[in-house]
Amino acid sequence: MRQLRRPLGPPRKILLATAAALAMAVRAAGAVWLARGAGRLWNGDPYPVADPAVTSQRLDGLTQQVYDTPDVPQATLDPKWPGGGQETDGSGCYHTGLKDLTKQVSDSPPSVPGVVAVSSEWGLKATSGTSCTRAARAPARLRHRLISWDSSTS
């Protein structure tokens, strides 16, 4: 038996044209998405930009919270603590992305200008009136506080 081919009717032509237009739109969107991804891979993720004064106030508030967290009333800052206090270090903030690959594999890769990591280190000195149990629990309270910061500030 031989089937006869019928010409496509107007509804079928509209359906095929719509499907073709949709396929082209999806293909174009995919090309844009790939181009943006390739640009990010080439340039790397940028470091966040922040106002130094606002960042300084935020870090000062966080440091004060850490100071208050141990809940050791008579404790004072230990002036003989070997830590450096508050420091900024730009030597660990390297270029990212494939365009800077030669800089990344260098023995001493250059840092990104204007990008720094800020740290604060200090110690407490307990007085004779501080209870041993309260002072012994202080590191656990600090650890809990710092872990909660890590998960909430990322």
Image: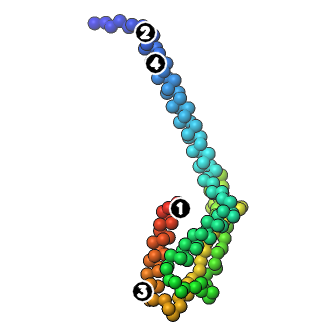
Residue 28 appearing in the image: yes
Q: CA distance from mark 1 to mark 3?
A: 31 Å
In terms of sequence position, does the residue under pointer 3 or pointer 4 come before the other? 4
Position of the N terminus, as image quadrant, is top left
Q: Which quadrant of the view contains residue 106?
A: bottom right
Spot the residue most to the right.
Answer: 113
**If you read the primary sequence from the N terminus, does the residue marked by circle 2 or circle 4 appear first?**
2
Question: Comparing marks 1 and 3, which lies closer to the viewer?
Answer: 3
Outermost residue, left direction?
Answer: 1
Structural distance between the alpha carbons of marks 2 and 4: 11 Å
User: Is residue 5 rendered to the left or right of residue 139?
Assistant: left
Q: Mark 1 or mark 3, which has the lower sequence index?
A: 3
Q: Mark 3 belongs to which amino acid?
A: Thr
Q: Which residue is mark 4?
A: 16
- Residue 109 visible in rendering: no
**Cα distance between the residues tagged 3 and 2:** 88 Å
Q: Secondary structure at mark 3?
A: helix
Distance between mark 1 and mark 4 Cα atoms: 51 Å
Q: Position of residue 111 (x, y in %)?
A: 68, 63
Between marks 1 and 2 in the image, the one whose residue lies nearer the viewer: 1
In this view, the residue in front, 1 or 150, is 150
Residue 133 badge: 3
Check disc 3: other Cα within 10 Å, few if <14, some if 14-19, many if 20+: few
Q: Which residue is mark 2?
A: 9
Q: Amino acid at mark 1?
A: Thr
Question: Few, some or many C-alpha atoms within 10 Å of disc 1 (few <14, some 14-19, many ≥20)?
Answer: few
Q: Amino acid at mark 4?
A: Leu
Query: What number is the disc on residue 153?
Result: 1
Q: Which structural element holds mark 2? A: loop
Q: Residue at x 51, y 66 (%)?
A: 149
Between circles 1 and 4, the one closer to the viewer is 1
Name the residue at the bottom extreme: 128
